Amino acid sequence: MKSVVIASLVAGSLVLSAGMLLRDGSAKELAGGLGARVFVVERESGSLAIYDLEQRKLLPRRISGLGNLNHAVMTFSRDLKYGFLATRSGKLSRIDLENMSAAGEVYTSKNSIDIAVSQDGRFVAAAEYAPGGVTILDAKTLAVRKRLRTTVTRDGRTIDSRATGIVDVPGNRFACVLMEGAEVWIIDASRDDFPVEHRIPVTRDEPYDAMITPDGRYYVVGHIGSDQVSVIDLSWPQNGAKSVLLRDAGELYDRKTPVKLPHLAAWAVARDKVFVPLVGEARLAILDRWTWQYRGSVPLRGHPVYAIRSPHEREIWVSFSGEEDDAYLQAIDTETLEVKRTWRVGARIYHMDFTPRGSHALVSANKENKLFLIDTSTYEAVDEEAIDSPSGVFGVWRAFVIGL
Amino acid sequence: MKSVVIASLVAGSLVLSAGMLLRDGSAKELAGGLGARVFVVERESGSLAIYDLEQRKLLPRRISGLGNLNHAVMTFSRDLKYGFLATRSGKLSRIDLENMSAAGEVYTSKNSIDIAVSQDGRFVAAAEYAPGGVTILDAKTLAVRKRLRTTVTRDGRTIDSRATGIVDVPGNRFACVLMEGAEVWIIDASRDDFPVEHRIPVTRDEPYDAMITPDGRYYVVGHIGSDQVSVIDLSWPQNGAKSVLLRDAGELYDRKTPVKLPHLAAWAVARDKVFVPLVGEARLAILDRWTWQYRGSVPLRGHPVYAIRSPHEREIWVSFSGEEDDAYLQAIDTETLEVKRTWRVGARIYHMDFTPRGSHALVSANKENKLFLIDTSTYEAVDEEAIDSPSGVFGVWRAFVIGL
């Protein structure tokens, strides 16, 4: 009872293929409501599993053939028609959220890393490593609307810089960071020609990732091997980036070679503080949310990878790298700034997210091949599902959050 | 092509009627994605109009026969299957969000005022005036799971108190306030018998409404004719309520008889401040978000009714009461605390809401019989739709926000 429509509009690297189900409800009978769907990246097989939060079970349908999903992030259109994935193979895939099937793909580059939907919902932007640049697509047709090459001149040399950390910014802008170019670009997605409105230099230490605070106010860039980050106040981009130190000046800490480099998406903003998983240290640094001054740190059981805030902002949950620690989570109280709870979930935790009102959390344990649903009142798993090599966990509610 | 299934399970006051469309797509072809649907209360006719934010048009389908929609608030299930409305006629209506049709109704009281969905999505609670109480329903079956009578003893007398201001609270609780009883009740929705876990006295001035901060931390109760409100820190409900003054002690202001009593849902929390539309005064009071101390006020063009924060928290938009002012909005800068913009939208603005990432706002102008879509970058209406006597504006994304 499945009817597949393939529309091949081969134009450059553009290939559209729409897999659709007949309206006989065969897909729908399997599924609960659209708002309860959580997509889980199966990293090894390049596919997506779909978990139904309400029924507490995996849907029988999986979406395959999506390419290299290493570090893949899924974003959603604000009308909840589509999800979008950029892949390390350069393919941008669109997923139909109702039929839970692939609904178009475009090769925008040879290696893409990050993706964002514009605040008005009209455009999808991919940040790319090879060739370095940003490709902006029409979210409806998947037609390429703009290719921005992130080419910069440094000391007389022309560099094709990798681009990463692309996010939506208030005012219908996009922001991204140029890794070799050491610049943040603000792109105006409200104008037909998508001009680069601001080019903001950051320190020359190689930027490797970036994040935006949940209010869309600050864009923060991490630098490899540095204990400083660059912070841009997006209300005043013309004021440039300021350097922020992630430790007390002069103080020494026990720093090891990092097992895993935390991504800046792993920074958590709660109340008036920013919680930062430090690279190669068993601490969570605390910065002031408004001044960005270092306020101290919380000792942890291992090297932190991800820090996420609970929706009620009373707890930060932290995951770890390293075999001895990576099955555990720690919950930090955002007021006492102490570890409130340490508990084992499952081996090699890769990603986690709270449900929007905070009653539960979803945690993927990659080595254990499991997805866990945790009751946040008891910290106990109330459901677990077998998933092959699970990684990123993406609920459709991300459609409604700045920067996700 | 429409097939209506009526399942009449008459048991007490319970009547279930499910209006469903065949899966021929007739409803679906009319509509864009589920995430772009905004329900607009048509107050005079007791119906809901549906605006599609993506297509920028009203859907031809309207939902009628919902009862007295005066002060009606719509909440949504977290799986986006259903919307729920409590009405002044005591009827609780369930709306199927996919087919955009009525999908069950229950008479829980003779006069209901407020509604909330539990954080785990399993229960819907209505706060009721007559008889005073809270009714908790199973969100799936609409079966009554608990009837709590809000009966209290005061000075030896037994009072059936009206209940209002019901919201979801972290930990899968509900909170509501008893108007004659002058108590806040915290109800534990994670236990089968829904015990009243805390009964917290507030000052005896008659409470009339309440709100919860977007992080689910503080529950705030307004008192009629008073310039004090009661604030409960939900992390420490056992510490009781504290009284908060909405002005400088001793200072006098030009206070008039209020044309319209602002509801506490009209309080806006942004950055480290709470913005309060004062009753009968042309000012917006500013309180500290964490200490609740009075910090000052912003002079306005008229008596404020609604204050809403933009998702990026840089602006508060304010609507007004009184014929001279009620067609206007003012935008307040949350940092300079000054009026940034004053502009006319349409006569008798009743309600407004930002789209989740803040690119647009929806504003209903009741006297002008219009819904406006405003571009928040330019403050200009980019779409307007004729709607009969529009009032509340409810986007489905409310499903994912604490307290909505």
Image: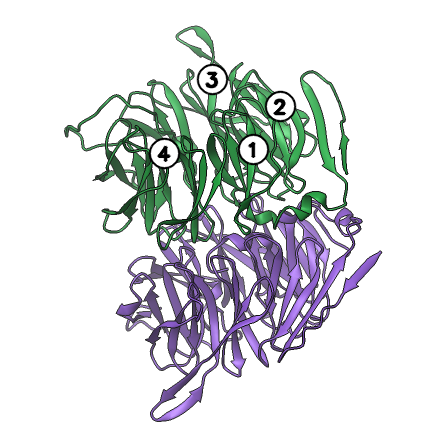
Chain colours: A purple, B green
Amino acid found under the numbered disc labelled 1: Leu
Classify mark 4: helix, strand or loop: loop
Q: Chain of mark 3?
A: B
Q: Residue at x 40, y 53 (%)?
A: A337
Q: Nearer the viewer, mark 1 or mark 3?
A: 1
The circle on residue B347 is: 4
Residue labelled with disc 2: B146
Amino acid found under the numbered disc labelled 2: Lys
Classify mark 1: helix, strand or loop: strand
Calculate the distance from the C-alpha at mark 2 to the C-alpha at mark 4.
42 Å
Residue A144: x and y, percent?
A: 56, 72
Q: Earlier in the sequence, mark 1 or mark 3?
A: 1
Amino acid found under the numbered disc labelled 4: Ala
Q: Residue at x 27, y 31 (%)?
A: B324
Q: Quick check: marks 1 and 3 in contact, CB under 8 Å?
A: no
Residue count near mark 4 (Cα–Cα under 10 Å), binned few <14, some 14–19, many ≥20: some
Amino acid found under the numbered disc labelled 3: Arg
Residue labelled with disc 1: B48
Calculate the distance from the C-alpha at mark 4 to the C-alpha at mark 3.
33 Å
Q: Residue at x 72, y 18 (%)?
A: B11
Image quarter of residue A51: bottom right
Residue count near mark 1 (Cα–Cα under 10 Å), binned few <14, some 14–19, many ≥20: many
Q: Is residue B277 above or below residue A254?
A: above
Residue labelled with disc 3: B162
Q: Earlier in the sequence, mark 4 or mark 3?
A: 3
Quadrant location, the N terminus of chain B: top right
